Image (cartoon, rainbow, N blue to C red):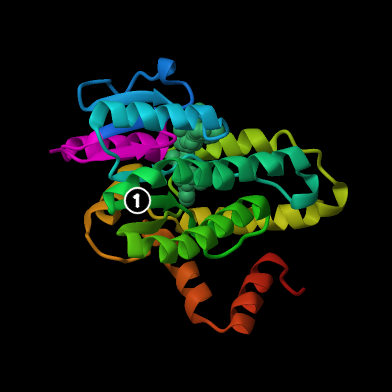
Amino acid sequence: MSKTVLVTGCSSGFGRDIAKEFAAQGWNVAATMRTPEKETELQASERMGLLRLDVQDRASIDAAVASTLARFGSIDVVVNNAGFGLFGVFEETAREKILEQFEVNVFGMMDVTRAVLPTLRKQRSGVVINVSSGAGVFTLPMISAYCASKFALEGFSEALSYELLPLGIRVKIVEPGGVTSTRFGERSAKEAGERTPIADYAPFVEGAGRVFALLRQARGMATSEEVARVIFEAATDGTDRLRYLATKDITPLVEARRQTSEEAYIEMMRSRFSPKL
Ligand code: NAP
C-alpha cells in the first residue's frame, strides 16, 4: 500500500516541489495550502489531494488531517513547510508582525504536529519533518524575528525528538539556505515595505545591505527541487538522523557556528556587520 505525506504551504516554492517529489515516488500526497481553489500547477488526482489548510486556523488543520485520513487511511510523514521571513531591523517591525511570524513559523508548525501525533502514535511509526533554515543555526541582523522563529523551531524539534523516538516516531530538521526561485523573497520584500524606518539605523542598514549583497553573490544555484529531494531522503532513509543541511551555500557559516569557538565566531560576525574603522 502506498504511503501518505501531508505537506503544508504547497501553493509555491519548496512545498509545491515537495508535493511533486513525493507524488513522483508513488506516494499519496495531501498537498495543503491556504487557497487550493487558486492552484493551477498541482493537479488533483486519485493520489494527490489539494486541501485547504491555513496554519493559523486550527479548524482548517483538523479538517485537512481528517480528510487525509478518510481518503488515504494513514499519514506516514508530515512536512511542516509553510513559513515566511520578516526583513528589517527589530525596532522598525510592528509587534503584530512578529506575532504573525511566530504564529505561522512556530505555533502553526506545533498545531499541525499536534493534530497528526495521535495517528502516528497509534501506528507506532511516522516522520515529522520541520523545515528550518540556515537562520535556525546562525543569525544575521535584519532578520532577527525570522531567526528567533527558526531557532524556536529547531529547539522544539530537537526536544520533541526525544519524546517521540520511544514511540517509533522520528523528528527531522531540514535546513535550506538561499533559494531564489521560490516566493520567499517576494513576501519578505512586501513585509519590509510595511515598516516605518527609524533614521538612527540608516548607516547600519546601508552597511548590512552591502554584506547581504556579498552573501548573495557567494550563493550557489541551489534549487527548490534539490531541497525537495533532501526532504524526501529525510522521510525515507530509515535513520534516526535529526538534522539535514539542504543546500551547500550555507555550509561555511554553519561550520563556523558549530565548529569555531564562541568568541571567534561572534568576533567574525561583528567585524562583518560593524567593521572597525
Ligand atoms: P514561498 O514560496 O513563499 O512558500 C511559502 C509557503 O508558505 C506558501 O505556500 C505560503 O502560502 C505558505 N504559507 C504562508 N503562510 C501560511 C499560513 N498561514 N498557512 C499555510 N501556509 C502558509 O517560500 P519557500 O522558500 O518555499 O519557503 C518554504 C519554507 O522554507 C519556509 O518555512 C521558509 O522559512 C523556508 N526556507 C526558505 C528559504 C529560501 O531561501 N527560499 C531558505 C531557508 C528556509 P500562500 O501562497 O498562501 O502565502
For the N terminus, give its image quadrant.
top left
- Depth order, front residue of 169/265: 169
Q: Which quarter of the figure has residue 87? A: top right
For the C terminus, give its image quadrant.
bottom right
Mark 1: which secondary structure? helix
Does 19 lie within the magenta span?
Answer: yes
The mark tally for this picture is 1
Residue 264 horizontal/vertical position (percent): 60, 82
Question: Is 4 placed left or right of 152 in the picture?
Answer: left
- Depth order, front residue of 66/56: 66
**Mark 1 residue CB less than 8 A from any atom of ligand 1:** no
Residue at x 49%, y 27% (from the top left corner): 60
Tag 1: residue type? Answer: Arg
Question: Is 222 placed left or right of 110 in the picture?
Answer: left
Does 187 lie within the magenta span?
Answer: no
Q: Which residues are magenta?
A: 1-28
Q: List the residue tagged with mark 1.
A: 121
Residue 94 visible in the snapshot: no
Residue at x 40%, y 47% (from the top left corner): 117
Residue 26 horizontal/vertical position (percent): 16, 37
Residue 159 visible in the snapshot: yes
Residue at x 74%, y 38% (from the top left corner): 96
Q: Please, which residue is most extreme toward the front here?
A: 122
Crowdedness near tag 1: few (<14), some (14–19) or many (≥20) residues, C-alpha within 10 Å: some
Q: Is residue 34 above or below residue 151?
A: above
Residue 272 horizontal/vertical position (percent): 64, 68
